[in-house]
Image: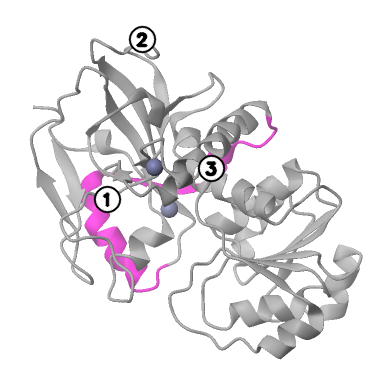
Amino acid sequence: MRVAVFTGPGKPIAIECVADPQPGRDELLVKICRCGICGSDVSMTSEGPFSYPIGCRLGHEYSGEVVEVGRDVTAMKVGDRVACLPILGCGKCDGCRGGNAIFCTAIKSLSGGFGEYISVPPRAAVLLPQSLSLADGALIEPMACGLHALRMAGMRGGERILVLGAGTMALSIVYWARVLGAGKIVALSRSAHRRDIVLAMGADAVHAFDTDDPKSLAEALGGLPDIVAECIGKQGQLNNAIDHVRPQGTVIAMGMCSQGEPIVAARCTFKEVRMLFPLGYTVGEFAETANAFDSGRVRPELMVSDVIPLEDLPATLEKLRAGAKSLKIHVDPSLSGPGRG
Ligand SMILES: [Zn+2]
Ligand SMILES: [Zn+2]
């Protein structure tokens, strides 16, 4: 089968032919149908302070269909449609017991969504509700991040929320802010064409980034924002968020900027700003996202701007590294290639 492999920072990724995975007796073999390109697939394969290990398989936002089950598997069957967790915890350490497998001391990667097949244990797979498409399924992973972030911020309902940006992380915040009962949600975006999708996800208004004046923003929100979510990830945006937030408000850094930016502590002190840096989601929040998609009025797959074959992934990543802007690109391995063999 074909799978995308990381060959080193700044280098084009490779599509390699490897042996098909053989599911163990307690594993499922999943035929991957959709896998989304994450901002980290761009930033962590580029030259920079953080990168994936060389030789690793890429793709962590994926959904697919179970095509084979090991003989000890009873929880799932052939034909089930699933979304997979991209990491697996040991289930025993402090991180795992708190539900945060991402902090597991013996973490195992289940990346490899940019490929044709993967074998995973059933506890890493969430059954897709009937109403969800496989494209929706591959959006559970990125969209669960917004739930985790707003939980971490202690959201209870009624808050005024300002979102900086209109990419996937921004949409995950807007979506969950609405589901969790925000008072007002306003997004700031440079891309006028993202307006419709941001509104569809639940924002009350979208303001232009460069021309916004704080007064019109406060008017749209009904006051200064209680929570500002920085979802751009560029130098300067953390300070921008600190500027906007109300005294004793909360800034959530979702942009995962890997460049430094000076923070003046005294300035934060004068506002008693609370700053949070959420990472991922809990296993429970992943399942909760699937259920929210099922019961919600929004079709998350509206976010998908392009669907490409696996062979186009290396060139597409190069374009994104060079600054091309896209909302959510999905890889569909069935669009090309020889398949399993
Ligand atoms: Zn990601
Ligand atoms: Zn663990």
Give the amino acid at mark 1.
Answer: Leu
Magenta range: 296-324
User: Distance from label 1 to label 2 (Cα)?
Assistant: 29 Å
In the image, residue 82 sits, relative to residue 77, either above or below, namely: below
Q: Position of residue 94 (x, y in %)?
A: 47, 45
The local secondary structure at tag 3 comes to: loop
Between 37 and 264, the one lying in front of the other is: 264
Any mark on residue 98, and which? 3
For discs 1 and 2, the disc positioned in front in the rendered view: 2
Are circles 2 and 3 on residues that touch, CB within 8 Å? no
Q: Is residue 166 left or right of residue 70?
A: right
Indicate the quadrant where residue 316 lies. Answer: bottom left
Q: Residues within 10 Å of mark 2 (few under 14, many from 20)?
A: few
Residue drawn where x is 68% and y is 49% of the image: 151
Q: CA distance from mark 2 to mark 3?
A: 26 Å
Q: Nearer the viewer, mark 3 or mark 1?
A: 3
Q: Residue at x 24, y 45 (%)?
A: 310
Q: Residues within 10 Å of mark 1 (few under 14, many from 20)?
A: many
Q: The residue tagged with tag 1: helix, strand or loop?
A: loop
Q: CA distance from mark 3 to mark 1?
A: 26 Å
**Magenta stretch: includes residue 183:** no
- The residue that appears at 30% across and 32% down in the rendered structure is 32
Question: In the image, what residue type sits under mark 3?
Answer: Gly
Residue for point 23% across, 72% down: 10
Q: Could you say where residue 127 lies in the image, as x and y percent from the top left?
A: 46, 22
Where is residue 60 drawn, in percent x and y? 36, 46
| Residue 298 within the magenta-colored segment of the rendering | yes
- The residue identified by callout 1 is 58
Can you tell which mark lies on residue 74?
A: 2
> Tell me, what colour scheme is on the image?
one colour
- The mark that comes first in sequence, 2 or 3, is 2
